[in-house]
Image (cartoon, rainbow, N blue to C red):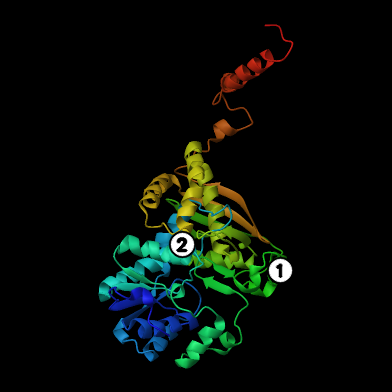
Amino acid sequence: MPKPSRTAGTSRPRKVVLAYSGGLDTSIILKWLQDEYGCEVVTFTADIGQGEEIEPARKKALKMGIKAENIFIDDLREEFVRDFVFPMFRANALYEGEYLLGTSIARPLIAKRLVEIAKKTKADAIAHGATGKGNDQVRFELGAYALMPNVKVIAPWREWDLLSREKLLAYADQHGIPVDFKKRQGGAPYSMDANLLHISYEGGILEDPNFAPEENMWRLTVSPEKAPGKPQVVELSYAKGDIVAIDGQKLSPAKVLETLNKLGGKHGIGRLDKVENRYVGMKSRGCYETPGGTIMLAGHRAMESITLDREVLALKDDLMPRYARMVYNGYWFSPERTLLQGLIDASQATVNGTVKLKLYKGTIMCVGRESKTDSLFDTRIATFEDDAGAYDQADAGGFIKLNALRMRIAANLAAARKPGRKK
């Protein structure tokens, strides 16, 4: 295979930090970087709750000739939930009204850590295994450029000619890269991405949007039909918009999400089958499991319902789709997302209290919400019984009539314009 022609006449990187899982694709990329670019490679493996053992990545990297000091394996679960997932849920973010952005929100954290390691090791390039068709290439690179403007980005899928499974396997055999039996036999019938917030399933047989996925595809949730026949009530405690305790037990951010994942999964909550519009322009079908996030969204909206002013809630709802697109499109480190996050976080100062949710066969129902310090719900005014003068019902007549004034004027004008009406 010839050297990449696009590097001719340009400075080649001395050292590159690779986002490395230890799987087949990134193992091939590691070897390809060594051969095609002739540079020193640093590997970075992130634990963001994907549920797989990540230490084997160290052994694989060592076997591929990576120096021990150039292997970074980081547990980022708490940072992931505290600094990325929680802020996003304060915004109640949903992409295209459904998707809870489980893959999207993990990418800026990985980009951030890639850049931190590049600076620490004095590397001048980063590399990732995202394809040229997907959104992740955009998210990784926008994040990297925002934090390290002059970094060189190497995206092998946009450069090499290993564009089929057969070519990848042949390259692995040629260079002695281990391939597990399942991969050689075709592996899973779809591509998966997992972290503490969700699992996504794409590609393969799911590329037919009319294909119903088999029940055994789902890994985090039982089907609603097989969920317990008895509902379960869970109490979430909030402080400034974030969950700080479940059923009275204080938990760290990562433990909150882990606990809610188990509860939601047990009750068949959080499945989604969606055709979405990718940032690169194509429609893509994906299936998602986000049990804990689905509970978090329901609880947060219930908490805000009694603690936020009506117009503040309306403004947040107006801005939410734009915020969600920023996250989906990779603009986490952009000035506009940072500015909007400040507005959202300021609104959360009063989002304190408890919410009770009933989980039952794929559904969530709020069965109680209370804020002893910040509730705007005034029972004296809201009651249907005698309010002892707290609310003057006669005021409603003038309020309605003034709001109807423009419509009354338009109706009178329309009536005056009817044919045959005397002028």
Q: Which residue is mark 1?
A: 226
Mark 2 to mark 1 CA distance (whole Å)? 30 Å
> Compared to 53, does 367 lie above or below?
above
Given residues 337 and 127, the one toward you in this image is 127
Q: Is residue 5 left or right of residue 201?
A: left
> Compared to 171, does 364 lie above or below?
above
Classed neighbour count for the residue bearing mark 1: other residues with Cα under 10 Å, few (<14), some (14–19), many (≥20): few
Residue 55: numbered disc: none
Tag 1: amino acid? Lys
- Residue at image position (57%, 74%) is 191
Residue 340 location, x and y as percent? 40, 48
Q: Is residue 202 left or right of residue 6?
A: right
> Is residue 252 visible in this depiction of the protein?
no
Labels 2, 1: front one: 2
Instruction: Check disc 2 and report its element: helix, strand or loop.
Output: helix
Quadrant of res 231: bottom right
Q: Which residue is mark 2?
A: 105
Classed neighbour count for the residue bearing mark 2: other residues with Cα under 10 Å, few (<14), some (14–19), many (≥20): many
Residue 343 location, x and y as percent? 39, 45
Q: Work out whether mark 2 precedes mark 1 in sequence or the reverse, and give the earlier one.
A: 2
- Residue at image position (48%, 58%) is 328
Given residues 134 and 405, the one toward you in this image is 134
Residue 177 location, x and y as percent? 46, 90
Tag 2: amino acid? Ile
Q: The C terminus is located in which quarter?
A: top right
Given residues 106 and 270, the one toward you in this image is 106
Q: Residue furthest right?
A: 420
Quadrant of res 143: bottom left
